[in-house]
Image (tube, helix red, strand yellow):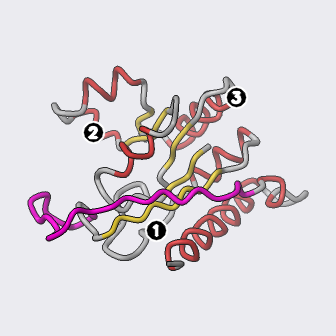
């Protein structure tokens, strides 16, 4: 289970290019885009339509030995920061009993971030850097009698803190 931030339109392609096989959770709206729909459907990516069904589908794929990429922000990051994190990645990790592997992605100089125009090109070539860290251990967040929803909130907060720390390190 790969959990990554989403600083640019191109980071997902970069991340998937270094993975031998990956199922990616994508915005359901992309299924309606004439440029993306065919490729997304053919690749078998997972649209983010229904929360509980999404968690079940991702967990099932992980149990079958597949890799799943989730961007907990759900959309591209704002310039020089992170957007709010949804709890879906944490719920998938808890349901599948898989330790999420955080991959912090840096894009320097920033380009194609949330709120930027596609034609707003930086003056110099950009570089994407993938920072792969050790997985967060799911069992550290599961304590009886804590409900799963509370464990998911704690794991989501830990993921967000990890990315905030990792992205501020030069």
Residue 149 within the segment the image draws in magenta: no
Q: Residue 166, relative to residue 61: is it above or below?
A: below
* C-alpha separation, residue under disc 2 versus residue under disc 3: 26 Å
Residue marked by disc 3: 63
Q: In which quarter of the image is the N terminus?
A: top right
Q: Disc 1, disc 2: CB below 8 Å? A: no
Quadrant of residue 157 in the image? bottom right
Identify the residue at image location x=66%, y=50%.
100
Of residues 147 and 42, the one drawn nearer to the viewer in this rendering: 42
Identify the residue at image location x=56%, y=72%.
166
Residue range in magenta is: 113-136
Circle nearer the viewer, 1 or 3: 3
* C-alpha separation, residue under disc 1 versus residue under disc 3: 28 Å
Query: Mark 1 vs mark 2: which is more N-terminal?
Result: 2
Q: Which residue lies furthest to the front in this view?
A: 124
Residue marked by disc 2: 30
Q: Position of residue 24 (x, y in %)?
A: 46, 38
């Amino acid at each position: 289970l790969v959990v990554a931030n989403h600083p640019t339109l191109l980071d997902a392609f970069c991340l998937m290019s270094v993975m031998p096989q990956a199922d990616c959770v994508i915005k359901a709206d992309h299924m309606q885009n004439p440029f993306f729909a065919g490729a997304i459907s053919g690749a078998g990516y997972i649209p983010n339509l229904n929360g509980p069904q999404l968690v079940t589908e991702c967990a099932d794929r992980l149990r079958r030995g597949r890799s799943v990429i989730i961007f907990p922000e759900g959309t591209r990051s704002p310039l020089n920061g992170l957007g709010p994190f949804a709890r879906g990645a944490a719920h998938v990790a808890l349901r599948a009993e898989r330790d999420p592997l955080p991959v912090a992605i840096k894009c320097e100089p920033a380009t194609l971030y949330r709120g930027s125009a596609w034609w707003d090109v930086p003056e110099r070539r950009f570089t994407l850097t993938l920072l792969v860290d050790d997985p967060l251990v799911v069992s550290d967040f599961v304590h009886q009698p804590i409900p799963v929803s509370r464990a998911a909130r704690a794991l989501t907060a830990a993921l967000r803190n990890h990315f905030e720390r990792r992205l501020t390190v030069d």
